[in-house]
Image: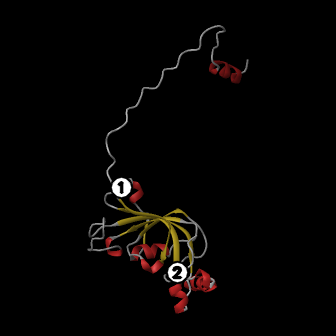
Amino acid sequence: MTLKSRALRCLAPVVVLGAAAPALAAPAPVAPSTTAIPLPLNPIVAAPQRLCGATAASGLGSLALKPAEGARPAKADFVLVNYIGYLAATGAVFDQGMQSAFPVEGVIPGFSEGLQMMAKGSTWRFCVPSALGYGAQESGPIPANSDLVFQVELVDFKTSAEIEAMRAAQSPAQQSPAQQSQGQPATPPRQ
């Protein structure tokens, strides 16, 4: 008998013909909870996921979580991203978005600087000091002088010229009545 066959024999269940199968214990019933989940639902990000490896001269911290090669968006470009933003001090999530489109220069300076470091398909973590965020200004759930952390996936980006070409290529039927009367192209449909 080989070692393998001995091991299999030890692991094989013992079956006694004519004997009843052992009864399995039924799982204990679970009572429904009467506790309401507090709203809004605000998850907390763990401390290790609030840290970055490198720091730029500006003070922006960064860590490539999923590197990619290729062109990077410029300040005047438009991006399509998946992101989550949370407070560096507590890990409290204050914002998140999927398939969010906006201009690179239309966000806080630290986020804009970070976007310009990314290649399409990459995912990064950016540690944004308050000076590159909202500074001494409170912004919704973000307290004044808060350091922020963002995890960002760059899904795609387009130059301003590409956006204008997309708008110009649309037929007049796709334009709003106001755009038709003013001769302006419609905005591209969301994908």
Residue highlighted by disc 1: 42
Task: Where is residue 135? Give x, y as percent.
Answer: 29, 74
Residue 160: image x %, image y %? 55, 84
Q: Amino acid at mark 1?
A: Asn
Question: How many residues crowd mark 2 within 10 Å: few (<14), some (14–19), many (20+)?
Answer: many
Q: Read off the residue under disc 2.
A: 77
| Amino acid type at mark 2 | Asp
Colour approach in the figure = secondary structure
How many numbered dots are placed on residues in this image? 2
Label 2 secondary element: loop
Q: Nearer the viewer, residue 54 or 124?
A: 124
Task: Nearest to the eye among marks 2 and 1: give it.
Answer: 1
Query: Alpha-carbon neighbours of circle 1 within 10 Å: few (<14), some, or many (≥20)?
Result: few
Residue at (53, 82) in percent of width and height: 176
| Residue 30 against residue 49 in the figure, above or below | above
Residue sitting at the far bottom = 182
